[in-house]
């Protein structure tokens, strides 16, 4: 079989596997997906996960394909069916973490570590600081693993702990007992284990294992250890070698001790299989050039595509209106800085990670007198500042190598005290080598990524609600919108550096789907009208318990209208808890949540308000249609491999998970695909489906060529974004459609077509070379896909 690296995908389709949509269901969908025009199926994690998992990122067993999804036999059957239709499979790989805890003995490596402690042959699998917790009473000087799983202090729940043979049970949790301790009285038994059961609230301050962000029940795996890599990847690598799997999507590489080393090992084991990484790039940051992979999973593309379809000036006016209304002049950047800072204070969610770094510094000082005797408060303050102010997810420093210039620049700011310089040098690997110094360097990088993700995406983006379509993974709401020139530069850079990296618009992690954001982007073109509308809706519904949440609520209604009551309440409550201002997951304010829930339900029950919301969404509809089709065509024709999220070939107005992870009726889509071939313009659903399959088939049949901007001329030329993909393919899309209408339409705007006879693949219309009035070209659709000589 030809290597997948030699033939990267032309396009992929992401399927969220779960008990409600298994590998067998995926196999039944193969004919439809082949007809749609993709080349690869992009499968969510395949290895055994926690029973009932709807996402698969909580792995419990690396030795088998999930039986919940159908097992290896079902995966092989899917691969066979896909190969019959000339499709291949990409698998999502989760190298960073496993589930903790799990039902009895499902996670065998962790089960044995809990039973046998640091002497277990699996002890090297997990990032555990055994020195941080006092050890069993009969093992002085040796530590144990903190398990913050109890609903209250242990004295209050002791009677809920039950010894069952060689197992200790607490409600649904099961823990192995250290050999020879099952007969002991409960207090002595607990004192002799290699783990310490504790109240869940102790996690933020006393946790001694690395986890996925701040999720206590996902324990990190040390995949940098060769034997751990082999054990956790054995099944996937075997299936790749046998031709069942062709490529990989690597989840959260920022959590790894050595992302580059991991990718090199994976490339060596697969012969260079097509691999992309879920790397979030901030601002103008680029993927490290020495990472052996095709590129990212595409959030950088999402930000540029959304950006070029967002009115910068209008978005800035919305920000001003929002700040006035909520009586808070905080900027998006300020909200992000505050969100990161709150995580690292002594009572913050990531305080345990900060303490672990400080313990390393103390050990380094004990062995190196030149680094000793720094006051602990000064060290903590300096470390928290470095973590808070680091501008990207992490530095890519490898101990023993010269730090990359970008890492030096990102750590160059801040204070210049002795403690600050010491910590910066340690983070950059510039204080010599020792096991403790190398560990600090690696763990600092792992911690900055957790601070960035939790502080910005999972906190600030739920607090700062001026225009929530900007608050997307990898987004920068402080810099709303980009112009065509910046967009063209990014496309040229992408084509030069990572031409086969993925591009995405919607994923299982986006807070709002592409079409939901397409509606919201129109608001930036009419900021004054939207601010007035918000005020009117608030007047009709009554005072909201929180002004910023009111902006979130009204935009959620616009983004997902029509929306049911339970969906709305679920999203609003999740957003308020993630914001952590009036309530949170760990300290819920039941009174506030009750009032907020009643307010959201009341808005949908308001007989006077709902028709007004529906009318406003209808007012936005023609402009949202333009944005939906423009973003879809850009996604499918800019440099890179478009990755379509399940169901997004038609309008999809989903919200943050779990709303966006529900199974999709692909059988119904298959029927509508046939309909769209004969009735291309009946409604937006058929229009988008027709555009998608047309562009996908073009990509599959005619490889797209070099990217080159194509400029229109005329009074409203700025509203057209056009480019070549080789000499015989042209993409043209409308941008800022509301502004275009206010300017009187296309008027004298023309696009100069090169020599040849050009065909719009979406309409079948033919055009000759020369100046083409854009009003003719975009008479039926707000976008065009032109080819010459087909």
Image (cartoon, rainbow, N blue to C red):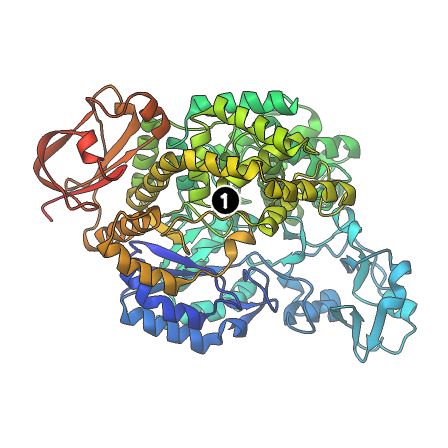
- Residue sitting at x 51%, y 38%: 611
On the image, which quarter does residue 189 sit in?
bottom right
Towards the viewer: 403 or 95: 95
- The residue located at (22%, 22%) in the rendering is 747
Mark 1 neighbour density, 10 Å: few (under 14) some (14–19) many (20 or more) = many
Can you tell which quarter of the image residue 368 is in? top right
Closer to the camera, 330 or 315? 315
So how many labels did they put on this image?
Answer: 1
Residue on which the image places disc 1: 560
Q: Quadrant of the N terminus?
A: bottom left
Residue reaching furthest to the front: 607
Residue in the picture at 37% in, 57% down: 13
Closer-to-camera residue (229/688): 688
Q: Is residue 17 above or below residue 391?
A: below
Q: Is residue 719 visible?
A: yes
Expressed as whole percent of the image width and height from the top left, the position of residue 362 reads: 75, 42
* Residue 325: quarter of image: top right
Where residue 49 sits in the image (x, y, percent)?
58, 66
Position in image of residue 438 (x %, y %): 61, 46
Which residue lies at the image location 55% right of the left edge and 45% below the top edge? 399
Determine whether, in the image, residue 168 is placed left or right of residue 620.
Answer: right
Q: Is residue 12 left or right of residue 477?
A: left
Q: Secondary structure at mark 1?
A: helix
Residue 231 % position (x, y): 54, 68
Residue 474 appears in the rendering: no
């Amino acid at each position: 079989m030809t290597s997948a690296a030699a033939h990267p995908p032309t396009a992929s389709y992401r399927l969220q596997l779960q008990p409600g949509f298994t590998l067998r269901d995926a196999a039944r969908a193969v004919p439809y997906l082949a007809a749609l025009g993709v080349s690869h199926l992009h499968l969510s994690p395949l290895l055994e996960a926690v029973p009932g998992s709807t996402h698969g990122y909580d792995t419990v067993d690396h030795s088998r394909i999930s039986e919940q999804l159908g097992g290896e036999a079902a995966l092989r059957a899917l691969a066979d069916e896909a190969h019959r239709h000339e499709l291949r499979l990409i698998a999502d790989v989760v190298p960073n973490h496993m589930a903790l805890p799990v039902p009895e003995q499902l996670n065998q490596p962790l089960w044995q570590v809990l039973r046998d402690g640091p002497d277990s042959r699996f002890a090297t699998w997990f990032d555990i600081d055994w020195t941080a917790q006092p050890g069993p009473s009969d093992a002085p000087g040796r530590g144990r693993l903190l398990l913050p799983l109890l609903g209250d202090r242990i004295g209050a729940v002791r009677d809920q702990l039950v010894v069952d043979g060689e197992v200790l049970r607490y409600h649904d949790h099961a823990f192995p007992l250290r050999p020879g301790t099952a007969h002991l009285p409960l207090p002595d038994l607990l004192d002799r284990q290699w783990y310490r059961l504790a109240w869940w609230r102790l996690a933020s301050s006393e946790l001694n294992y690395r986890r996925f962000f701040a999720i206590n029940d996902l324990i990190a795996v040390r995949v940098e250890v060769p034997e751990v890599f082999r054990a956790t990847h054995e099944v996937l690598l075997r299936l790749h070698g046998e031709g069942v799997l062709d490529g990989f999507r690597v989840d959260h590489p920022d959590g790894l001790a050595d992302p580059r080393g991991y990718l090199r090992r994976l490339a060596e084991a697969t012969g260079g299989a097509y691999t992309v990484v879920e790397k979030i790039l901030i601002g103008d940051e680029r993927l490290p050039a020495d990472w052996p992979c095709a590129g990212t999973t595409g959030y950088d593309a999402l930000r540029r595509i959304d950006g070029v379809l967002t009115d910068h000036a209008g978005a800035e006016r919305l920000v001003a209106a929002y700040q006035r209304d909520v009586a808070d002049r905080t900027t998006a950047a300020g909200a992000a800085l505050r969100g990161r800072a709150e995580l690292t204070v002594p009572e913050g969610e990531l305080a345990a990670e900060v303490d672990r770094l400080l313990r390393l510094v103390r050990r380094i000082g004990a062995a190196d007198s030149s680094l000793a005797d720094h006051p602990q408060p000064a060290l903590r303050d300096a470390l928290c500042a470095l973590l808070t102010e680091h501008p990207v997810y992490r530095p890519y420093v490898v101990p023993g190598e010269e730090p990359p210039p970008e890492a030096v620049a990102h750590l160059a700011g801040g204070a210049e005290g002795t403690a600050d310089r010491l910590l910066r040098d340690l983070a950059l690997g510039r204080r010599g080598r020792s096991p403790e110094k190398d560990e600090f360097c690696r763990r600092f990088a792992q911690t900055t990524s957790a601070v960035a993700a939790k502080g910005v995406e999972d906190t600030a983006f739920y607090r700062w609600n001026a225009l929530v379509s900007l608050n997307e993974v990898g987004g920068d709401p402080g810099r709303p919108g980009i112009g065509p020139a910046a967009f063209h530069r990014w496309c040229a850079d992408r084509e030069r550096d990572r031409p086969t990296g993925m591009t995405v618009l919607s994923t299982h992690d986006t807070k709002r789907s592409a079409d939901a954001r397409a509606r919201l982007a129109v608001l930036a073109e009419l900021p004054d009208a939207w601010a007035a509308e918000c005020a009117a809706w608030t007047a009709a519904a009554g005072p909201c318990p929180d002004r910023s949440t009111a902006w979130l609520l009204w935009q959620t209604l616009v983004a997902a209208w029509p929306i049911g009551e339970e969906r709305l309440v679920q999203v609003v409550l999740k957003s308020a808890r993630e914001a952590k201002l009036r309530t949170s997951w760990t300290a819920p304010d039941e009174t506030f949540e009750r009032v907020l829930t009643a307010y959201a339900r009341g808005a949908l029950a308001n007989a006077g308000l709902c028709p007004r919301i529906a009318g406003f969404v209808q007012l936005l509809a023609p402009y949202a249609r333009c944005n939906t089709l423009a973003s879809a065509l850009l996604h499918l024709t800019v440099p890179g491999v478009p990755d379509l999220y399940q169901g997004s070939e038609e309008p999809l107005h989903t919200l943050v998970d779990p709303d966006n992870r529900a199974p999709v009726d692909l059988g119904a889509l298959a029927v509508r695909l046939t309909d769209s071939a004969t009735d291309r313009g009946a409604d937006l659903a058929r229009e988008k489906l027709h555009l998608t399959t047309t562009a996908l088939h073009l990509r599959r049949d005619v490889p797209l060529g070099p990217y080159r901007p194509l400029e229109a001329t005329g009074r409203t030329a700025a509203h057209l974004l056009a480019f070549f993909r080789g000499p015989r393919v042209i993409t043209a899309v409308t941008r800022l459609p509301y502004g275009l209408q206010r300017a009187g339409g296309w008027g004298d705007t023309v696009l100069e077509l090169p020599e040849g006879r050009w065909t719009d693949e979406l309409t079948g219309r033919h055009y000759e070379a020369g100046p083409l009035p854009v009003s003719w070209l975009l008479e039926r659709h707000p976008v065009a896909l032109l080819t010459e000589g087909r």
